Structures are given as structure tokens and as C-alpha cells.
Image (cartoon, grey):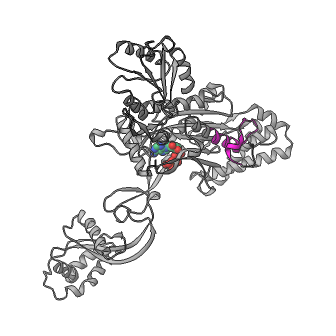
């Protein structure tokens, strides 16, 4: 069967999500609220499974990562230190006609003919109005004086443009025409009706704010290519891009003033940095180690879109993995080792990933890229559905040494699922400076090793550490940080190495739960042909979730609902499995229809209790059930006693 086209496919997915209770629009009965989504019964299970597997993989299955659960609202100082108050913004522009807001970097470039209108006049009595505009000189003089120079130019232009037309017309010199002096432009497709089309849009613009019958005055027109200055939906002019802070603001306490402003966290990561020292001191961990957190994050996205992909409220799963700076590794181990490749191709999948205490940031970064890809493979997103996008040097934040975006091939294009960034010691350093509390660690191995290093090595390491700290302090300097002070601080930091002190660097794999759920749903969706109850082929929608994430692991069906013995046996099987996995009991409708319902829910296994189970056709089949596989539709006969271990083996 032909692959459904991508947007058709998205439509089918969105409709299935609603029909089967994966995802609903938030506040739907009130018309919804843009950028907010609710998870229905199946979606909630899917989400819980994904989060549970992430936590187990990242925290429980490792010795070197611990968890944190911090609040959503924190001190606003945190967001000043992290840079979110000053720089967490998207360039945004508004459509002058509809006021719709766009993210400037997401406006598709377009080509066409741009019509520039200088202003518009009331066209009730066109000639009279224009005449008035041109000849009522005294009144106009007064008006012109009040106008800003740019508007005045346009207005004067209007007067000369129409002078000829009005020369012989009758008019009332005491009446000024109503005029809207705003400039407006429209991009239209070239063709015989281009001017009419441009005028129509311009009239809508001038009409909206007062003129009942506007006559737009054309200043010029020109062909224009690849412009992002116009609304792709209606051709109307867009405002120049302006930064728009994405943090949701609120007030703490009863007084809604600037003193009490707080923000809903736009990421979970910052709490990890702010609590770094507390976690370090209470968990008995030593660098390298990580702190993981998952939870809600909020961003007032300019254009939420692609279903749940870009939402305003979403969940993140983030790890901050703290490592020693390369200079420290070099002091302790004499050199920094990199990850070894098992083949000549330097792809992360070819790397040997036994962690090593001699690894520098580059090795740790590659290690985490590969670990995260393996995580996705383990929950049913094959490597071929993902892409690694290594940010180019010019795209990197000034403190980042490398960033990889892991993209998933969604039906609407390959888009970021997770970012894995080597963020140097930027975050802890920022919190140290803003809070005044030390964020560094003491490393006895470093202190012991330092004393044994030759003088030249010490000098070399100290110099490199100093250069790095100076670069950071210079980039983030505040108005009263003088160059002398920066030099002094950087030198102090570098001297700290000899005493065993440094600020850890960090590798940050940061994933979005909701984007992952959407990726899993998109990847699971499939259609095939299966026979209906009468054996006629029909289209079957199957959600081929990996059993580990599937919302329901097994469905239990008594063949007939009106046979008490079958029902009792089926309930016995349900109760046997239920303590260990999600079970759905269904006794309504023909068995084929019950299978279809579970195929759409993505339930990997179906267990049917029939008359053989009761031993009616012989002792050897007594207490056996049919176990149906969702993907192959194959059925096998399994003893009830073997069912639990067999299923546990397949769903874990
Ligand atoms: P984008 O460029 O798509 O806006 P980002 O680079 O700003 O994403 P990060 O700040 O790195 O994203 O956030 C880490 C992860 O959080 C992303 O990879 C994504 O999975 C998730 N995420 C970020 N913003 C949103 C959102 N608005 N809706 C859903 N998930 C999001």
C-alpha cells in the first residue's frame, strides 16, 4: 500500500489520537487553548512508560547518576544568572493586517510584486476629498506641521499625485478629507489582477482602523525575491523582528508588582545547577557524576505548531553530567584520552564506550550522544529514524564546545527530539558569580597529582585554564567588571588548580517527553490489510509500539460473554497478569473487532479464553489460551502457567 502523504498522515495521526484517547486539545469544550494538550487514558499510560524507562535507564541502572525533583517556580535570580531574563527570546514579527504573530526565523521566503502604499484617504466623495487634501492649504499647513517628517513626505506626495485629477472638481475648501497616514505594503503574485489584489488587502488594512471607504494611495511597486517581510498567508506587511521573551511571568504573593515577579521554569536544568552543591554533599558522588531531573517546563512559544511538537507547556527529561575539565584530567592522568573507534569511520555508533577516568569532554560528549541513541533504539525508534545534527561552530552558543541535535524524521520533516550539549563550566560559573556561593569542587587526586608535575607542565596547564576562565569572564562581563578585575579573577581560578580546586564542566542531554511521545506515535502508526469477521480484507490501523512503551501490554478476551465458565476463566487470567502489567479486559463484540480495537491502541498481545481452555475438546488443551501477536497476527497456544513469564520476557 502506498505511503500516506505526510500531511495526510499527520491528519490521520491527530484524528486517531483523539478518537482513541491518546491526546486531546486542552480545554476543548471552550474552544481549546493554543499550544496546550491533554493526554487521554492511552496517552497517559504511554507517557508514564516513557518517563519510567528514562528514569530507570538514566538513574536506577547506573551508579554515577542521581535524581532531583525541584520546584517549577524558583528565585528569579536563577533566570538572571542563566541568561534567560536577558536573552531567552525569539525574534518575532506581527502581521499588520491580522495581528497574527510569527517567529521571524520561521517565515518562508517568498517572491512576487510588492505594492507600497503611502497612506489612504476616505473615498466617500473621492474627487472632493482629494481636492480638499490638495488645496486647503492653510488647514494642511497646520496638519503638516503636526506630522512627523516621514509622514509629511508621504502626505505631500499625495497632494502632488492627485493635483491634476482634482484641479477642475467642485469641493468644499473648509473640509479636510479623513486620512490614514500609515504606510502599508502588500506582496502579491504577478499577474493581470495584481494591483486589484494588492488594493483589496490594503483597503482591509485601512478599513480596520477607521476609514469606512479607504482609497489607498500607491507610492511605488517593485518585483522582489526571497523576502521574509510579508505574511505568507495573506501577503500583508510584517513588522520588523523584535525580541520576545518566552518565559511565562507570574507574581508570588498577593501583590502583583515588579518586586514579586517570578517565572514558570522554561527548562528543568537550572535547578540542577542551583542544587549542585547540596546534591554533591549529600549523595557521596564524585565528579564525574550526573544529576537527572524530569518535569514540566513552560515556554510562551510564538507559534506553537505541528500538533504537540511545539507546545507552551511540556515536559523535559534532562541530565547534567558533571566532568573534570581537560586540564584536570591531564594533571592527573598525564594526557586526555579520546573514545576509540572500532572502525575507521568516526561515527558515534562505532565508538567503544567503556567509560574511562582519562576521558576529556569530547569523549564524554560522544559517549552521551551514543547512549541517547541507544535509549531510543531500546524503545522502538531505530537508528535509521534519527539524524545527528552537529551544530556548526558559528551556530554554537559562546560557552558551548559542541552541540548535537538528535532529529527524528517526523512526517513534517526531521526535527529536534533532543539536544546534547557540551556546555563547559558556564552554568556553574554563572551561579557562582550571581549567588556569591562557591560552586567549585575540591579534588584530592588533583592536589596530589599537581605537586608531582614538572614545572613546565604546571605552567602550561595553569595558562590554558587561565585563558579559558578569562574568555568566559570577558564574554559575560558586567558593567563594573574591569579588565584588571577579570585578569585577577582568572588568575585566581588558575591558581586554584594547585590546591585541587576547579569548577566542573558539564555535558547536557536534554530531551522533550512530548516530542518523544509524538515521535513514538508517528513511528508506530501503520496501516495494513487484514481479514474482517467474514474473511473479507479490510484496512487495519495498527499502532506498532514497542511492547516496553505500549500503553496496554495485553488484552484478555473470553470468546463469548454469555458463557459464565469462559468469563470466570478469563477474569482469572486477567487477575493473574494484572499485578505485573497493564491488562485490558474486553468481552463485547465479535472477537475480530476486539482485536482491531486493541491493534489501534497498540496492545502487543491478545489472550483469548475459549472452549479448549475449559478442556471441552480434550484434556491436553485444558488450561491453555491463544496468544495473538499484534504485528504478525499469528496465534500460538500457551499454557496459562507459562503465560506470565513469557509475557514478562517480551514486555520488559
Ligand atoms: P527548538 O529549537 O525546537 O525550539 P530548543 O533547542 O529551544 O528547541 P532546548 O532548549 O534544547 O530546545 O530544549 C530541550 C528539549 O526540550 C528539546 O529538544 C525538545 O525536545 C524539548 N522542547 C523544547 N521546547 C519545546 C516545546 N515548545 N514543546 C515541546 N518540547 C519542547
Q: Which residues are magenta?
A: 346-371
**Quick one: quadrant of the C terminus?**
top right
In the rendered image, the vertical position of residue 378 relative to residue 157, given as above or below: above
551 in magenta: no
Residue 145, picture quadrant: bottom left
Residue 101, percent from left and from top = 37, 55
In the rendered image, the vertical position of residue 548 relative to residue 475, given as above or below: above
> Which residue appears at 23% of the width and 78% of the height?
140
Residue 442, percent from left and from top = 71, 33
Residue 510, picture quadrant: top right
Residue extending furthest front?
617
Residue 68 visible here: no
> Which residue appears at 35% of the width and 45% of the height?
34
Q: Viewer-proximal residue, 510 or 333? A: 510
Tell me how many marks there are: 0
Q: Viewer-proximal residue, 565 or 343? A: 565
Residue 565 visible here: yes
Q: Viewer-proximal residue, 215 or 9? A: 9
Residue 563, percent from left and from top = 34, 15
In the rendered image, the vertical position of residue 649 relative to residue 618, given as above or below: below
Residue extending furthest right?
454
Residue 434, percent from left and from top = 56, 42
Q: Viewer-proximal residue, 170 or 619? A: 619
In the rendered image, the vertical position of residue 69 relative to residue 370, given as above or below: above
350 in magenta: yes
Amino acid at each position: 500500500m502506498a505511503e500516506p502523504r505526510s500531511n495526510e498522515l499527520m491528519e490521520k495521526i491527530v484524528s486517531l489520537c483523539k478518537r482513541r484517547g491518546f491526546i486531546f486539545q486542552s480545554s476543548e469544550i471552550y474552544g481549546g487553548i493554543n499550544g496546550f494538550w491533554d493526554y487521554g487514558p492511552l496517552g497517559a499510560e504511554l507517557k508514564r512508560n516513557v518517563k519510567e524507562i528514562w528514569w530507570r535507564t538514566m538513574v536506577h541502572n547506573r551508579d554515577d547518576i542521581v535524581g532531583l525533583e525541584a520546584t517549577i517556580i524558583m528565585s528569579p535570580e536563577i533566570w538572571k544568572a542563566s541568561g534567560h531574563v536577558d536573552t531567552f527570546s525569539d525574534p518575532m514579527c506581527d502581521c499588520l493586517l491580522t495581528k497574527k504573530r510569527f517567529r521571524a526565523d520561521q517565515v518562508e521566503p517568498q517572491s512576487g510584486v510588492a505594492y507600497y502604499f503611502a497612506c489612504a484617504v476616505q473615498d466617500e466623495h473621492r474627487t472632493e476629498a482629494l481636492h480638499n487634501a490638495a488645496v486647503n492649504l492653510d488647514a494642511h499647513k497646520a496638519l503638516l506641521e503636526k506630522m512627523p517628517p516621514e509622514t509629511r513626505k508621504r502626505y505631500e506626495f499625495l497632494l502632488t499625485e492627485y493635483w491634476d485629477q482634482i484641479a477642475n472638481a467642485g469641493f468644499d475648501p473648509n473640509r479636510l478629507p479623513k486620512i490614514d497616514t500609515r504606510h502599508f505594503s502588500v506582496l502579491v503574485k504577478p499577474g493581470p489582477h495584481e494591483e486589484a489584489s494588492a488594493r483589496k488587502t490594503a483597503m482591509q488594512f485601512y478599513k480596520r482602523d477607521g476609514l469606512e471607504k479607504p482609497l489607498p494611495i500607491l507610492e511605488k511597486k517593485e518585483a522582489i525575491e526571497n523576502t521574509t517581510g510579508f505574511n505568507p498567508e495573506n501577503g500583508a506587511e510584517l513588522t520588523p523582528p523584535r525580541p520576545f521573551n518566552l518565559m511565562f511571568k507570574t507574581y508570588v504573593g498577593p501583590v502583583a508588582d515588579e518586586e514579586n515577579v517570578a517565572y514558570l521554569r522554561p527548562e528543568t536544568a537550572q535547578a540542577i545547577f542551583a542544587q549542585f552543591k547540596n546534591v554533591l554533599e549529600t549523595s557521596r558522588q564524585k565528579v564525574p557524576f550526573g544529576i537527572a531531573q524530569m518535569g514540566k517546563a513552560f515556554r510562551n512559544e510564538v507559534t506553537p505548531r505541528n500538533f504537540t511538537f511545539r507546545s507552551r507547556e511540556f515536559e523535559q527529561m534532562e541530565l547534567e553530567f558533571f566532568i573534570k575539565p581537560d586540564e584536570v584530567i591531564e594533571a592527573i592522568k598525564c594526557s586526555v584520552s579520546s573514545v576509540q573507534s572500532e572502525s575507521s569511520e568516526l561515527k558515534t555508533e562505532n565508538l567503544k564506550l567503556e567509560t574511562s577516568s582519562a576521558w576529556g569532554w569530547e569523549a564524554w560528549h560522544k559517549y552521551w550522544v551514543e547512549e541517547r541513541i541507544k535509549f531510543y533504539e531500546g524503545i522502538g525508534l531505530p537508528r535509521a529514524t534519527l539524524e545527528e545534527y552537529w551544530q556548526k561552530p558559528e551556530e554554537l552558543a559562546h560557552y558551548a564546545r559542541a552541540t548535537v541535535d538528535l532529529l527524528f524524521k517526523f512526517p513534517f520533516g526531521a526535527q529536534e527530539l533532543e539536544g546534547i550539549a557540551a556546555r563547559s563550566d558556564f552554568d556553574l560559573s554563572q551561579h557562582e558569580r550571581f549567588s556569591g556561593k562557591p560552586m567549585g569542587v575540591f579534588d584530592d587526586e588533583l592536589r596530589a597529582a599537581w605537586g608531582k608535575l614538572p614545572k613546565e607542565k604546571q605552567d602550561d596547564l595553569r595558562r590554558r585554564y587561565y585563558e579559558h576562565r578569562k574568555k568566559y569572564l570577558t564574554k559575560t562581563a558586567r558593567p563594573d567588571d574591569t579588565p584588571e578585575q577579570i585578569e585577577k579573577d582568572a588568575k585566581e581560578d588558575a591558581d586554584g588548580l594547585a590546591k585541587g580546586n576547579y569548577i566542573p564542566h558539564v555535558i547536557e542531554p536534554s530531551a522533550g517527553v512530548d516530542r518523544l511521545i509524538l515521535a513514538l506515535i508517528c513511528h508506530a502508526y501503520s496501516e495494513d490489510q487484514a481479514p474482517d469477521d467474514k474473511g473479507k480484507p479490510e484496512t487495519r490501523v495498527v499502532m506498532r509500539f514497542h511492547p516496553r512503551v505500549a500503553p496496554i501490554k495485553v488484552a484478555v478476551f473470553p470468546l463469548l460473554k454469555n458463557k459464565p465458565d469462559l468469563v470466570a476463566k478469563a477474569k482469572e487470567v486477567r487477575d493473574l497478569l494484572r499485578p505485573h502489567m497493564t491488562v485490558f479486559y474486553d468481552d463485547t463484540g465479535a472477537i475480530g473487532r476486539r482485536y482491531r480495537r486493541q491493534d489501534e491502541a497498540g496492545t502487543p498481545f491478545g489472550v483469548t479464553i475459549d472452549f479448549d481452555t475449559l478442556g471441552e475438546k480434550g484434556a491436553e488443551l485444558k488450561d491453555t489460551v491463544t496468544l495473538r501477536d499484534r504485528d504478525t497476527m499469528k496465534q500460538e497456544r500457551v499454557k496459562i502457567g507459562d503465560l506470565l513469564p513469557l509475557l514478562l520476557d517480551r514486555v520488559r
